[in-house]
Image: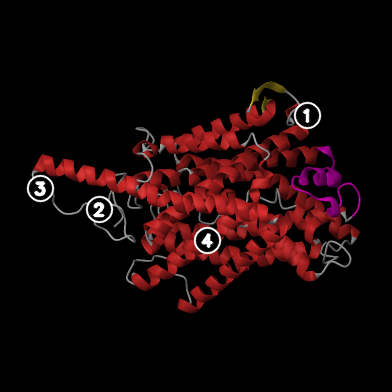
Amino acid sequence: MSLVPLVALIFFSVSGGAYGIESLFSTSGPGMGILLILIAPLIYSVPHALVCAELGTAIPVEGGYYHWVKRGLGRFWAFQQGMLAWVCSFVDMALYPVMFTSYLSSLIGVVAPGKHVFFTVPLIAGHNLDVDLNWVICAGVIVIFTLLNLMGAGWVGDSSVLFAIICLTPMLILTAIGGYHLLTEGINPVTPLTAEQGQSTWNAFGSGLFIVMWNYSGWDSVSTVAGEMENPKKHLPKALFWSVLLIIVGYLLPSVAALAVGADGENGWKSWDEGAFPDIAGELAGPWLQYTVTVGGLFASVAMFSALLASYSRLPSALSRDGYLPPWVSKESKRYRMPMASIIGSSVIYALFCFSSFSNLVVFDVFLTNIGILLEVAALIALRIREPELERPYKIPGGWWSIGLITVCLTAISVWAAIEQYNEAGGKAVKYCLIVVGAALLLFPLLSLRKAAKESAALDRAAAANGSVHGDAYGLSGSQWDPAHSDKAATGTGTGSVEA
């Protein structure tokens, strides 16, 4: 995977374009919405991207941030990082096939949920599961892009370039037409500042920040396929830089142009919700642009699913190589050297989550994402202290002052997001988060005991076969690499190499 496909892969792992940003303006207002699009990268995206650039070039192996945390903080925290991110993906990844069918149903009404039910599966406590056309299409999308992922991250990156062109072209047209309306009609797109008269600036800022955090998260996602990059030590920092610019512009220009529709009316910004851009396009230029933007949304949905599947599916594979999951989870295909069971198994779980009305589960998405970000920052600090001589092709400039500022920014915004999440969803958010975090904490000692027993048995067999045991095959400290795994190092030495 070379530089341009890598930029496209990061673009879809984080953003996918302005599709989905619409509710920011009905929540916070035009002025505050534009301000947040510009401010959020400075306090959230850029600090995280800098962390990813340093750690990703210092440790460019398949499994990415899982191995960053393991090397910096040890096996326990690495397991939490990998497991929490993978479980969080169950809900996150189901969003994109459902988003695809949502856009499709605006073109073909029969695709809407419950419109065409094939059969019903009875469940416990009187609940039923409807297998309808909507879910079948979701499953079809998952199958197609699972097959693409089985061909390797290179294919995913190349297809992402094509998808980016298809997704961004409608938004460029909308930007041009909306910009023309702003200029010729003398509309000021950034007034008023807030959504409602009497809404405080702080309330508008806080409510909108939570929305843009979700739309600006995911900078570490591409790190898990570092073993399949052409030259991660050189290309990853460049790709992160260009992706940050592309994503900011991709949010900013269409949003400003769309504000030409005004505040009131059926498609005014006061009524905007996720998926409103096609209707906005229709009001600005007619049905032809509405259909064009809808097609762009269709491709954005599947491209985001494809890019994130490449990222998340490497996590169970990495956990398997380290002995926490069965060996067959990391088994690779002979032709493409992809972890087949990990990719297919993850996709099956995502398809099952497409059945549910899971919007109530999304409340722990940002919370768990921020836990992972803070673990990466802690790993960065630990490695700076414990391994100052580690080769860092890209090193965050400014020394400890910059790292301190990054730590303060990301910690403060994560704590604030947790408080806002509690205020918005109450005990439900806390309950879901405690269940997921508690399960990960309990699983580690159980799986560690299983792993230790298997290692001991392997050593006993080796001793019986050779008459002696040549050292402790697993005598590494918790912050070092497990020699049992087979990371694909950036040197291209294949699956038998070990980054030590």
Q: Could you say where residue 352 lies in the image, as x and y percent from the top left? A: 58, 34
Front: mark 2 or 4: 2
Crowd class of label 1 (few under 14; some 14 to 19; many from 20; radius 10 Å): few
Tell me if residue 428 is in the magenta stretch: no
Residue 45, image quadrant = bottom right
Residue type at mark 2?
A: Tyr
Residue in the picture at 39% in, 65% down: 393
Q: Secondary structure at mark 1?
A: helix
Residue in the picture at 60% in, 44% down: 91
Crowd class of label 2 (few under 14; some 14 to 19; many from 20; radius 10 Å): some
Q: Quadrant of the C terminus?
A: bottom left
Residue in the picture at 47% in, 62% down: 376
In front of the other: 29 or 179:
29
Q: Earlier in the sequence, mark 4 or mark 3?
A: 4
User: Which residue does the numbered mark 4 point to in the structure image?
Assistant: 373
**Residue 474 numbered tag:** 2
User: Which residue does the numbered mark 3 point to in the structure image?
Assistant: 468
Q: Is 62 situated left or right of 249 in this image? A: left
In the displayed image of the protein, which residue is found farthest to the bottom?
401
Residue type at mark 4?
A: Ile
Mark 2 to mark 4: distance in Å?
Answer: 29 Å
Residue 192, image quadrant = bottom right
Q: Earlier in the sequence, mark 1 or mark 3?
A: 1
In the displayed image of the protein, which residue is found farthest to the top?
118
User: Which residue does the numbered mark 1 point to in the structure image?
Assistant: 109
Q: Secondary structure at mark 4?
A: helix
Q: Earlier in the sequence, mark 4 or mark 1?
A: 1
Mark 3 to mark 2: distance in Å?
Answer: 16 Å
